């Protein structure tokens, strides 16, 4: 089979995959195959003027150019959907929709100074301002101009799940004559949990028990119930603070979250640093590095790990 024919067959197959709505990964692999064969074919033609024909070279060039366009409207739509889901989760945790006495609507999101890049991502998309709160180690994002707020509402309407936040959004929708959309049941692959974890989640380890915990706290238990169904874990009441805490501690469930869910829905806050260290944690614990003498290779590896871990907030 000639190289040109093989490229042509791969190109047709990529079109079939694209139109059939299959996963992006398969289409990406096919595009890469086309690109590699196209480059190889063109290189051979350049080195040997007698090989191939002008028609073959033209086909290979077109395919190579097409394969470099790895993004598609479907890819962009998926990325936007993930961002909107993440934003809704973040708002459900650290956000607040407000309507002033004079009828002015706004959205505010407060995050730690270390997570400023999260707020600037939102600012770049919808406008607004990011300012340091006086005497505090936190930043406040505020969006109040109508055009940006309407754009944001269009993105998160139907994705907000916190009952308190739904009521707040409902007031703004009513003032703008917008229909408030009820949220659909949460699904495993939704980016909502990533945003919610960035706001109300934490990750920490217990040296004595050798366990690692991924948690999220909320006053409303309703929000946390879905997490147990989708990601495992358990909900505990926090009586003193009047809230509930979802805790995931079983190794299989933790690794599933880190290696499956968060791979598809990346954490955007600094908590992602600890998430990226989870596999190393279990590897070192499996080697009993935590019990090794400080001067041994394993002991030094564990010390280096814990120093890096402690330098990142929960």
Image: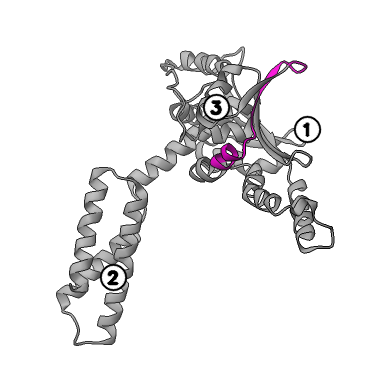
Residue 67 in percent (x, y) is at 31, 61
Query: Is residue 240 located in the magenta-colored stretch of the structure?
Result: yes
Category of crowding for the residue at label 1, using alpha-carbon neighbours closer than 10 angstroms: few (below 14), some (14–19), many (at least 20): few
Tell me the CA gap for discs 1 and 3.
35 Å
The local secondary structure at tag 2 comes to helix
Q: Where residue 104 is drawn, which disc sits there?
A: none
Q: Earlier in the sequence, mark 2 or mark 3?
A: 2
Q: Which residue is mark 3?
A: 227
**Residue drawn where x is 32% and y is 73% of the image:** 39
- For the residue pair 30 and 295, the one nearer the viewer reads as 295
Q: Which contiguous range is marked in magenta?
A: 239-257
Q: Residues within 10 Å of mark 2 (few under 14, many from 20)?
A: many
Q: Is residue 56 magenta?
A: no
Q: Nearer the viewer, mark 1 or mark 2?
A: 2
Residue 254: image location, x then y, percent? 60, 39
Picture quarter with the N terminus? bottom left
Residue where numbered disc 2 is placed: 38
Quick check: 38 above or below 226?
A: below
Marks 2,3: beta carbons within 8 A: no
Disc 1 or 3, which lies upstream in sequence? Answer: 1
Q: Could one spot residue 90 in this view of the protein? A: yes
Judging from the image, what secondary structure is the residue with disc 1 in? Answer: loop
């Amino acid at each position: 089979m000639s190289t040109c024919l093989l490229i042509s067959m791969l190109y047709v197959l990529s079109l079939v995959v694209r139109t059939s709505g299959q996963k992006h990964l398969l289409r990406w692999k096919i595009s890469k195959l086309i690109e590699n064969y196209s480059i190889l074919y063109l290189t051979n033609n350049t080195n040997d003027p007698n090989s191939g024909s002008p028609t073959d070279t033209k086909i290979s060039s077109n395919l190579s150019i097409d394969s470099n366009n790895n993004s598609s409207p479907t890819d962009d739509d998926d990325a936007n959907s993930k961002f909107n889901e993440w934003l809704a989760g973040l708002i459900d945790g650290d956000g607040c929709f407000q309507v002033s006495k004079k009828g002015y609507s706004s959205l505010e999101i407060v995050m730690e100074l270390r997570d400023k890049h999260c707020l600037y991502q939102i600012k770049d998309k919808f406008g607004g301002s990011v300012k340091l709160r006086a005497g505090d180690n936190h930043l406040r994002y505020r969006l109040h101009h109508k055009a940006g707020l309407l754009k944001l509402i269009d993105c998160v309407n139907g994705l907000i799940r916190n009952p308190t936040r739904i009521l707040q959004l409902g007031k703004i929708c009513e003032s703008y004559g917008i229909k408030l959309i009820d949220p659909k049941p949460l699904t495993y692959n939704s980016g909502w949990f990533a945003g919610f974890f960035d706001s109300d989640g934490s990750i920490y380890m217990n040296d004595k028990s050798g366990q690692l915990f991924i948690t999220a706290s909320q006053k409303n238990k309703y929000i946390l119930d879905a997490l147990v169904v989708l990601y495992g874990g358990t909900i505990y009441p926090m009586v003193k603070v009047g809230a509930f805490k979802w805790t995931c501690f079983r190794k299989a469930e933790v690794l599933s979250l880190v290696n499956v869910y968060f791979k598809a829905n990346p954490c955007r806050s600094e908590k992602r640093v600890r998430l990226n260290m989870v596999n190393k944690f279990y590897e070192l614990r499996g080697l009993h590095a935590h019990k090794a003498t400080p001067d041994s290779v394993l002991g030094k590896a564990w010390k280096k790990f814990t120093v890096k871990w402690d330098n990142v907030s929960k």
